[in-house]
Structures are given as structure tokens and as C-alpha cells.
Amino acid sequence: MKITTAACLLFITFLSQAKTWIVDQRKNITSIQKAIALASSGDTIRVMPGLYREGNLIVKKTLALMGVDYPVLDGENKYEIFTVTGKNILISGFKLINTGRGSLEDISGISAVQTKGLIVRNNKFENTFFGIHLANSSKSLIENNTLRANAEAEYQIGNGIHAWKCDSLNIRGNDIAGHRDGIYFEFVTHSHIEKNFSHGNMRYGLHFMFSHHDAYVANTFHNNGAGVAVMYTQDVNMIANRFEDNWGSSSFGLLLKDIRDSRIEGNLFAKNTVSIFMDGSSRCHFEKNVFRENGWAVKIQANCDENIFKANSFLSNTFDMATNGSLVLNKVDYNYWDNYQGYDLNKDGIGDLPFHPVSLYSMVVEKMPSSIVLWRSFLVYLLDRSEKVVPSITPESLKDSHPVMKNYDYHF
Amino acid sequence: MMKIAKYVAYDIIRNRFVLLYTLFLLIVTVSMYSLDSDAGKSTLSLLNIILLVVPLVSVIFTTMHFFNSYEFIELLLSQPVNREKVFISEFLSVALALSLAFIIGVALPTVLLANNAAAVYLIFSGVLLTFVFVSLASLASVLTRDKAKGIGIALLFWIYFTLIYDGLILYVIYSFSDYPLEKVTLLLSSLNPVDLARIVILLKLDISALMGYTGAFYQNFFGSSTGAIYAFLLLLAWIIIPLWVALRKFIRKDI
């Protein structure tokens, strides 16, 4: 009891020591630089509305920097705006515009180096080179920020939220557009990406490299240059995301390159040229996903093994699956295919004949892309039909032995 | 000329064959749209019918009609009427009657049941294909005096354009697959009226798959106004050129 009282007292004295500094261009503290210099660890700095041109703001103390009605911090196309290092720093409610650009340095709206417990919340970024750049940081929360950039080419722009060698990040509810990669992860572990909206970025909506034990849930990736890429990673959970409108020959809804032991569950893939492209990936579970109106629902290279596709819905895709070889080490079972033409005599809801999702012509197109021009001609119809009767070129073993007769009722 | 065309058309429309054709198209179209809730898929199934059945029926009906009304044509030509007028009115009446059947059978239910861009293209291409194949069949029927031979030639046109030509394109693509073939295949396939109609509709339906490099190239071309005009002019050429050749033959022909 005594100890708790003592702790309470200590806490109260600590609170009373924490001061609030107000930066206002019409009062005595007119610059944020000055407030940061005056404040000591644990203080709060409130910044009143206005335009602040203060170059680079370096924060090394535990401070809570809060903007009131979005004060504008202008980097004048020369400076990085916030450079942050330390513990438990909060930055919220600012509008950060016009950072400098660099080809050697990653100049950012907020750059965090070796931080712990950083919170970046409710900020607006406009025309920043990198939006938020995290390096060697942990246990941080990046929440409800809006990032906008309008570069014309990839080399002119950095990533929206860039994390390098971090741990336990939580990136939630951000809206990112016009950057190179919307969200970029490299060597980031145990992190959570949730409910972000990444759209119209030059390269990937989300880019994952060497980042193990992460999850991304309920994000929307729309109309990015090349969709979402997850590479050289293990144990990633990709759940309930939407991958939409990624059009182009090298554009994918989801690119999986050297991925192991991951789960892809309950996602919607709609109107992509290729909704999933898999290369060298193993032991991934694809369950309860919906593939709708894609060019290719799944392109699975022959070097993938032990992946399981179960209980997915394939609706109105031009090609359901394509592969580049005859070796098949993956399992496809209990999916719904709207192209299935078999029957169900014993009425158990499962088709009596197996379904072969790879059509002959999808293999032809895989080899000679320009032959897509003959798609849906009578000739192609005949070729596909005869191949269905006597499979000789398409991999016989790539089949769904238990195609479900009725569409799964997944809602998005 | 209008008078002859009117009589011939009247005669054709009373013909049971055209009525059956209309009914067939109507039943197929309505059942396609009511079977599948997804209008896009029904349009796809219809596409196959239009690319196969419409040319086939046009070709067979035109040649049959021409040879069956040979005596009537002879009778007309014994009167002081221009050969050109007789031939053109024969062509127009057959083409218009079949187009009318197509419009009642396919276009009407399509407009009522499915209102997507692809369906509009489907209707346009169906009518144009009818004209193209009536024109080709007219050429086939003036090439020979023998009815069986005439139908044979007309069927050859049909098989060539729906099947053999695509086989040749596939062969070209296969043999030269190491080269960039986009422009070549675009040119080659646009020289076939059936392929041209198919690609134009395909660009509306399978858009995701086509947005690979090849597809994007096609989309760029046919999506632009130049491309649309090019496609239309080519189809028009496929109507006019065979008809013109047939007309030349018919005028000089010893009947």
C-alpha cells in the first residue's frame, strides 16, 4: 500500500514538473526551434496555426509536439523537417510540406533514427521526398496520417512510409498516394500494418523485403504501378486486404517472391492483370480469397512447392491459373470455379469430376504473349476443348479434385 | 431499284427461313441473359454465337437465295432494267432482311436485358458481319453457275475466316515468337473481319487480361478514334470490295 502511494506521489510530482510550452507567432515564443531548446524532457509543446519556416527541427528529448489546427511546417524544398531520436516522442497535428530532395540522402518529412515508442499521428504530408522514415526504431505507432506527393518518375521521389531495420511497428489508418512505394519495409520484424489506403503510387503499394513475422490486415491497395510485393520473407500474414486495378504486363495484385510459411486469407483480388504472381514460394496457405475479373487469377511458377489453395472463389477471370512447367508440387482443393462444367450426381455439393484450372491457351499465352490476340476465337475454343478431353500439354496433376458446386458466400 | 429491292425483301421476309433464324437468335439471346446473372458472361457466350452463326447463316442463305431466284433474275433482266440495279437490290434486300432478323433477335433483347458497352459493340459488329458475309456470298454465287459449287465456295469463305485464318496467325506467332509481333499481329488480325469484330468486343470484355503489353498496345490503337475509324473502314472495305468484284462479274456474265 505504501509503495503504491509513494509511486502515485512520484507520478504526480513528475506530472507537475512537465510543462506545456506554447508556440505562437503573436506571443513571446515565436519559433519551434526555441521551444524545443527551452523545453526539457517530458514537456509538451503546442504549436498554434501559422506558417513556420525553420529548416531542420532536431528533437532529442522526450517531447510531445502537438499542432493546433495544422500549423504548416515548410521545408522550402531544401530541408528535412523533423529529425527525431530518443524515447517516447509524440508528433501530431502538423502539416509538413516541401522537403528537400536528395539522391544520396533520404530527406524526409519526419525522420526517426534510433527511437523507441515514437508516435506520429494525424499529420498531413504534402510534397515530401520521403514521408516518414524510420531507421533502427522500435515499438512505434504511425497512425492516421495523410501523405500526398506528385512526382512524375520513380527516381524523383521517395517512399511514403519507409522503415528500415525496425521492430514492433504499428502502422494504421494512413492514406498514402503518389510516392514511389506507399509503405516500404526492409528488415522489419513483428510489425502490424492495418487499414491503410495506398493508392496511385509509382511502384508498389506495399513493399516488403526481408521482414519476418509481420502482418498486414484490412488494407486497400488500389491502382499502384505494380501492386504489392512481398519478397524474401517468412511468416507474413496477409488478411482481408483488397488488391484492385493493378494493370500492366509486369503489374501484379500481389507479387510473392521467395516467401515461406505465410498465410493469405480472406483477401479480395479484383480487376488486376495478374492478381497473384508466385515465384520460388513455399508452404503458403491461400484460403477464403475471392478472385474476381482478373486477367490471370494466379500465376504460379513451377519452382513453388507445398502451397495450399483452399476454399477460394474464382469468378469471371479470363484465366484462372497459369504455370510455366509440368511439375506441380502444390495442392488445390475445395475451391469454387465459375468455369467448372462438371456435375454433382450425389448432391453433396462437390463436383464429381476434377477441375483443371490451367487451360491450354493460358500456357500458349504464357510462352507467346502476343497470341492473346486470338483469345475467344473459335480456333482457341477448339484447342482448349480437345486439350480438356485428352490433357497432354497442361499439367495433369494441377487440379482441384473437389471443386465446390456453389459459390462461397464471402462478403466485402 | 427501290421497287425491285422492296419486292425481293418482301419475298424474303415472308420466307420461313428468315423467320426461323430470327426466332433462333431471339431464343438464344433471351435464354443466355436469363441463365446467367452476370451480363458480361452472357455477352461472352453470345459473342461465340455471333462470330460463328451469323456469318454461317448469312453465307448459306445468300447463296441459296441467289440460286433459287435465278429464274426471277433472268426474267427481270429480260426487261429494260439495268443489271447493276438488279444485283445491288438483290444484295441490299438480303442483307437488310438478315440484319433486321439480327436486330430483332439479338439487338432488341440485348438492349432490354443488358446495357453495357460490350453489348453495343456486339450489335454493331453483328450487323456489319452480316453485310460482310452477304457480300462475300454474293461473290461466291456469281463465280459459278452450279448451286452446290456456289454454296461450297461460300462455305469455304466462312471456314477460312472463322478458323483457318486464325490458325495461320497462330502459326506466324509461333514461328516468329522471338520477335516483337504486336504490330504484325494487329495488322494480320485486322485483315479478317471476324477477328476484327472479336478484338473490338474483347477489348471491352477481357480488359484485365489484355492490359499486358500486347493488350495495352491494342487498347491504345482501337481505343483511339483513329483505331475506331480504321476498324470501321476495314469492315466497310470488306463489304464494298467483294460486292464490287461480284458486280463486275455479274455485269459481264452470260446468264
Image (cartoon, coloured by chain):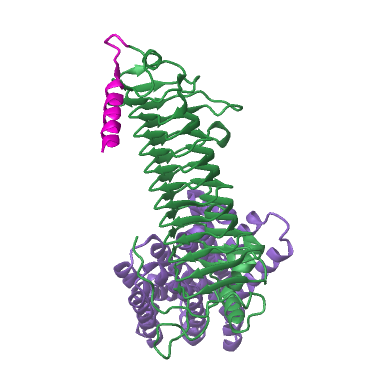
Q: Decide if residue A260 is on the left or right side of residue A67.
A: right
Query: Is residue A391 magenta-colored?
Result: no
Q: Decide if residue B176 is on the left or right side of residue B162.
A: right
Residue A326 visible in the snapshot? yes
Q: Decide if residue A381 is on the left or right side of residue A364.
A: left
Residue A47 visible in the snapshot? no
**Quadrant of the frame with the N terminus of chain B:** bottom left
Q: Nearer the viewer, residue A377 or A411?
A: A411
**Quadrant of the frame with the C terminus of chain B:** bottom right
Q: Tell me the magenta residue range.
A: A1-29
**Relative height, residue A299 to residue A32 (above, below):** below
Query: Is residue A3 magenta-colored?
Result: yes
From the top left corner, tell me how far across and down residue B20 is, in percent.
38, 85
From the top left corner, tell me how far across and down residue A283 is, in percent.
57, 64
Q: Nearer the viewer, residue A58 or B190?
A: A58
Q: Quadrant of residue A329?
A: bottom right
From the top left corner, tell me how far across and down residue A304 is, in percent.
63, 64
